[in-house]
Amino acid sequence: MALINTKEMFRKAYEGGYSIGAFNISNLEQLQGVLEACKERNSAVIIQASKSAINYAGVDTLVSLVKTASDEIGVDCALHLDHGPDFEMAKRVIDAGFSSVMIDGSHFDYEENVAITKKVVEYAHKFDVTVEAELGVLAGTEDDVTSDVHQYTDPDQAVDFVNRTGVDSLAIAIGTSHGAFKFKGEAKLRFDILEDIQNKLPNFPIVLHGASAVDQEAVATCNQFGGDIAGAKGIPVEMLRKASSMAVCKINMDTDLRLAMTAALRKFFAENPKEFDPRKYLGAGRAAIKNVVLGKIDNVLGSKNSL
């Protein structure tokens, strides 16, 4: 099996009215859980690594790990840089073998975002690597990405941005947010903005970040076995499925995987106090990751049999 870019999988997703799951990993068990679920459902998949995941595991290690695991399990996948902070980081992972990158210039002013995105696109396309950018600002915290404000994406600006940069996909802000604590009140996504962008950029793949549902059962299990995750709240599944049926071709989910693995490990340690074999408790975490991804494919993404 091979690492592939996102171009063809996004084309099929747009035409088919479904999304591809983009799952963040930083170790072997997370990766295996994701790929095993996608193999079982015959689903396309994007494996993501952030800057901190790369710092944790090593860029060459991650590339080798993903290539080897995808080959052993039998699933082609994209290996994507999530929230690349600058050109240097994007170049580093492209040179190491990533097949897709995100350059996140959303914290810069508009013209600077255009300039840095265009620079990354020009370099990446030399190596047949696809590029995602972001326009608008998501509130919340995930990994190294933090913002106290939310700024919706302007549809007309999105058209200008795509035309000027040549980017392959665009992450937009319509009300999702990073982290486990996305809402204090009821969730609300601006589908009117998504529809406007879809009409103005026909057949162009849109990305949703901060789109974990924050499974309340996983939260409850964490808390039951010694955790302290109070008030965690995510995006309702029906809203994510609606977005998947529109122009959204990629949905990022990180928090849900973290919660599932943490809940499984906490439960395992509580119920098996004499156990100290890492394969046992990490295996429980891997199984929990697989179950989460199976549920995402069936209930959110609609990507079964997309390979």
Image (cartoon, rainbow, N blue to C red):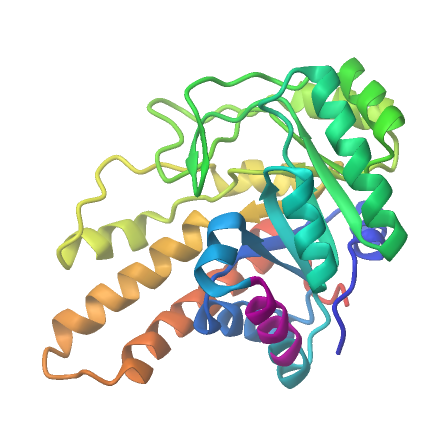
Where's residue 303, x and y in %? 69, 58
Say which residue appears at 41% left-offset and 20% top-offset.
148
Q: Decide which of 96, 265 is in the foreground and name it.
A: 96
- Quadrant where the N terminus sits is bottom right
Lateral position of residue 28 relative to residue 86, left or right: left
Is 281 covered by the magenta stretch?
no
> Which residue occupies the extreme left position in the image?
273
Q: Main secondary structure of the magenta part?
A: helix
Where's residue 111, x and y in %? 74, 16
Say which residue appears at 59% left-offset and 59% top-offset.
297
Query: Magenta residues, as a range?
Result: 59-68
Lateral position of residue 89 relative to residue 195, left or right: left
Lateral position of residue 59 relative to residue 194, left or right: left
- Quadrant where the C terminus sits is bottom right
Is 65 covered by the magenta stretch?
yes
Lateral position of residue 268 relative to residue 108, left or right: left
- Regarding residue 168, the answer to whether it shows in the image is no
Q: Decide which of 2, 45 is in the foreground and name it.
A: 2
Say which residue appears at 61% left-offset and 53% top-offset.
22
Where's residue 33, x and y in %? 49, 71
- Regarding residue 160, the answer to whether it shows in the image is yes
Q: Please give the count of numbered marks on the rendered protein.
A: 0
Where's residue 123, x and y in %? 83, 45
Q: Decide which of 134, 40 is in the foreground and name it.
A: 134
Give the vertical position of 233 relative to 185 (above or below): below
Give the vertical position of 188 relative to 61 (above or below): above
